[in-house]
Amino acid sequence: MSDVAISTDAVGAEAHSAGARVGDFIELLKPRVMSLVVFSGFAGLMVAPGDLHPVLATVAVLCIAVGAGASGAINMWYDRDIDAIMQRTRKRPIPAGRVDPQEAVSFGVVLAIGAVTLMALAINWLAAGLLALTIAFYVFVYTMWLKRRTPQNIVIGGAAGAFPPMIGWAAVTGQISLASIALFLLIFMWTPPHFWALALYRAGDYAKAGVPMLPVVAGARATKAQMLVYTALLFPLALAPWALGLAGAVYAAAAVILGLLFILAAVRVWFDSGERAARQMFAFSILYLFLLFTLLIVDRAPGLIGGSLA
Amino acid sequence: MMTQSLPTPAPNSAEQRRRQRARNRAVLLVLLLLVALIYVISIVRMGGG
């Protein structure tokens, strides 16, 4: 552990004397990240063929949410030294000294075990296995192995954020299919341009903390070129649910429009020497995924656009 | 690796006790919800859901 981590722990221990608030533990779960994970997991559950009792569907979504939150808490525990350096993360509960690091990691581990166990007992073993794999991938592969070692950290690590629709799908069908893999690939390919847009205007922060994000290691120009490549690759992938019969024409039309807008955002980033286009692309990338999955759900919903009432 | 001595905890202040109570209530609430959830899941599963 670095000196920075020691001093962070010392600050943490001192401020901890008053004890953590309940809200601090909720903050450890990274609620904003959790919302996107829960939504994509819910989408996987909704578009999967078959039926799942509403109570069990709610339990499945709850398990995905708690599993994602647990990963976030363990990530905050492990990254407390670099979180204390970065402007964006220095007010998190551990570096701010509001939660003891050991309490945070215990909280995360207990929640992770609880979420996987409940998923296995209430839903099925495949969904539980995928949830366990997601948590393990995020904690061990992304956080502990890749994040501080390679600029490809979020390319490979992005798989952790791409699993939730597969978990939702597996909860309903008990299987992994081509369609659920397509949903996985959609988020997997979306993640690099999403994170690199953020990294472009936070490059100084990452450099200070020694995190080898692509803009820090390869520079802004190379990052922008990569973002263009990934948004171009994402375009046909977003049409895969339609090609596989998972969604109808409304989804396909929206995927084309949103895909073109995403590529346009990447082109604007390419020509922009400042931060504005990158900030806008980061915001749009979130909207892109929310809209795409919303349309996927709506397109399949009975009585709505493309769904059947039968 | 330098050794680090943790600061001596302050005596129980009103704020400390208030936060402790809030955490205890949150844990109680989560446990009660978990019991209710497992009960409902059991009913659904036994009903063939």
Image (tube, grey):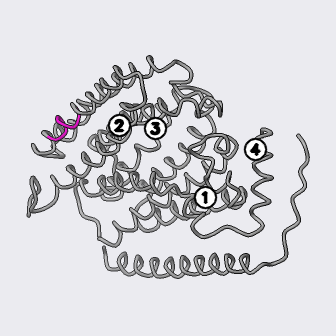
State how far apart marks 1 and 2 are (Cα). 33 Å
Q: Percent position (x, y) of residue A235?
A: 24, 30
Residue placed at 20% from the left, 36% from the top? A239
Mark with earlier residue (2, 3)? 3
- Look at the image and tell me in which quarter the C terminus of chain A lies: bottom left
Specify few, some or many for label 4: CA neighbours under 10 Å numbering under 14, 14-19, or 20 or more. Answer: some
Mark 3 and mark 4: Cα distance apart in space: 26 Å
Q: Which residue is mark 4?
A: A5
- The amino acid on which the numbered mark 2 sits, given as a three-letter code, is Gln
- Amino acid carrying mark 1 in the image: Gly
Span highlighted in magenta in the image: A254-259
- Disc 4 marks a residue whose amino acid type is Ala
Task: Kindly identify the residue that appears in the image at 34 percent across and 73 percent down.
Answer: A55
Asked whether, in this view, residue A308 is left or right of residue B2, the answer is left
Which is more foreground, mark 3 or mark 4? 4
Q: Chain of mark 4?
A: A
Residue A170 place in picture, x, y as percent: 35, 53
Q: CA distance from mark 1 to mark 4?
A: 19 Å
Q: Secondary structure at mark 2?
A: helix
The residue to which callout 3 is attached is A158
Mark 2, residue position? A280
- Chain of the residue displaying label 1: A
Task: Name the residue carrying label 1.
Answer: A108
Closer to viewer: mark 1 or mark 4: 4
Q: Residues within 10 Å of mark 2 (few under 14, many from 20)?
A: some
Residue A148: horizontal and vertical position, in percent? 63, 32
Distance Cα–Cα, label 1 vs label 3: 20 Å
